[in-house]
Image (cartoon, rainbow, N blue to C red):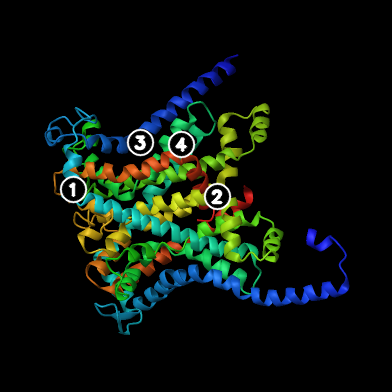
Amino acid sequence: MESNGQGNPSVTIRRSSKVEKTKKKRRFKLRPYLLLIPIFVFAIGFIYYPFIKTMLHSVSTVNFKGEITGFAGLSNFKYLFTRKDFITALLNSLKLTVMTVPLTLLLCVVMALLANNKRKLSPIYETMFTLPMAVSMSAKAMIFRVMLHPTVGIVNHIFNLDVGWFLDEKTALIGIMILVVWMGLSFNFMLLLSAFRSVPDQLIESAKIDGAGYFTRLFKIQLPLVSPTLFYILCTDMVLAMLTSGPIILLTHGGPSRATTTLIYMMYASGYGSSNYSMAACISIIAFVLTFAFMILAFVFERKKVHYE
Amino acid sequence: MSDKSRRKLFNVLTPIAAIAVGIVIVFPLVYGIFGAFKSPAEFSSYPPTVLPKSFLYTENFKNAMNIMPFWRYMFNSLIVASISSVVRITFAVLAAYAFAFYDFRGKNLLFFLLLATMMFPGDTLLVTNYLTVSQLGLMDTYLAMCITSFVGASQMFMLRQNFRTIPRDLRNAAELDGCGDLKFITKVLLPISKPVLITLLVQSFITSWNAYLWPLLVTNSAEMRTLQVGVSMLTSLEDTNYYLVLAGVTLSLLPSLVLFVIMRRNINKGMTAGALVG
């Protein structure tokens, strides 16, 4: 504003400064690209390049060194779908997603509603709700190993159960599910809390004056207004649940008898474990396809959320 | 009147319910930390307890620190988390600056390409990135452990939003005074954006400190492991040295927990805003 409107310099000075400016501008043009080089080198090298390479590997024969030795078409995928262990892994990942995502969402809504109004004790329970976020997945998983141990663990004792948890093929996946739900709570709670708190107070107050009860307000005002956040959480959680692998690598190695083998665990085991890179690539592509729609939806909903806030 | 008393009851019960839920949520952490103070005998005795007999029993910590090269792991984690977070934020700052203060050809496309990196889940690229790193001969190096965390698209987005609130004229004026891009970034931009920067750095540091899978994949030798990987190697499912594991876990989670509690407000704000873009 200032530089445009102020002063009336003589024509000659103006001209010379204009020439200088265009000169500078031409020189400027390179600079933004230079500034973008560092981040793009790694974005290409460790995100785009590996993605393309994974796609190539999935339709090729690949030796144990990771070198492509020939074109295989879709035979890798066909072979994969004839394997029982792959079908098991696929089903386990789907089960895990279907069971954990709605539960996490429901619990987070309850937590966010409990914490919604600011009270004297708010800092205490808000910290409690978000604390697990600071702890690594591996630490949480190892605590669960002890907690859910059939004899030494506290859970069987408290609930008077006689369950083998991670050591029993019938309950191992349930143990993983409990862990996954617990790990998802903190972060989602935080997102939801800030969404609930940004619902305008006047809206709720005027609804109260009109005689709307708690549940009417919840279902007709609050939930619709936080729905972009809810959908965002739904989508990101779907992706995370479909890709669950860390706790399985730490706790069960996919066992007992493949009861907890998930897609990404199988990818990890076949690629890193037994150097079957084309198979690992196929599984990776399948996992990617299964989650891609949710990724895009999450992307769309978070835009909406930005807009809305 | 009854409506008022009902509301009063509601106001008393809600915080109580919230605290009760909070206790359930932090229970595993408390159980883990308390367990680190239990002796082997306490662990095998029936019935299992939450509270240890004494918080002065520190044998587990001593043993855990003897069995694994604890300080070396701590040092490794510190190096990896520092390099990862500093480089990630530096690259993000440079890119955000370019997007906020320059107009250039292909700007929108490049911006989209960078944001789109968030749509490729790191887990699906794990094996291929492992191949790349081993082919580059980087196995068992600090660089290998950091290299996949250098791209922070959501951090870049947040910083750009922040930089956009700064008038372009300010930079133009600085430019005329002979202040170059880097000087402008370090002398003007970064001091103004200090709160966001600190939040993003701490958040990246914690993420990196807590990373498990990638450091596990690219390290072979015992002395290059990070704390998270090292602690997880204290045990296998069949082992019964729970006390050692929990001591290791407690040692490994304390730094990030302390950092988190101190920075809680900032981190919450930063993560919420960061999550808006993934």
Q: Amino acid at mark 2?
A: Lys
Q: Is residue B138 visible?
A: yes
Q: CA distance from mark 1 to mark 3?
A: 25 Å
Marks 3/4: CA distance? 13 Å
Place of residue A301 in the rendered image (x, y in percent of width and height, measured from the top left): 56, 54
Q: Nearer the viewer, mark 2 or mark 3?
A: 2
The chain holding disc 3 is B
Q: CA distance from mark 4 to mark 2?
A: 32 Å
If you read the primary sequence from the N terminus, does the residue marked by circle 2 or circle 3 appear first?
Answer: 3
The residues bearing labels 2 and 3 have C-alpha atoms spaced at a distance of 32 Å
Q: Helix, strand or loop at disc 4?
A: helix
Displayed quadrant of residue A23:
bottom right
- Could you say which disc has been placed on residue A167 in the image? 1
Residue A283 percent coordinates (x, y): 33, 68
Tag in front: 3 or 4? 3
Horizontally, residue B245 falls left or right of residue A238, namely left
**Type of amino acid under label 4:** Met
In front: B157, or A89? B157
Q: Are marks 1 and 3 in one subunit?
A: no
Q: Nearer the viewer, residue A287 or A75?
A: A287
In the drawing, what numbered circle is on residue B194? 2
- What residue is drawn where x is 78% and y is 74%? A18
Q: Cα distance, mark 1 to mark 4?
A: 32 Å
Label drawn at residue A111: 4
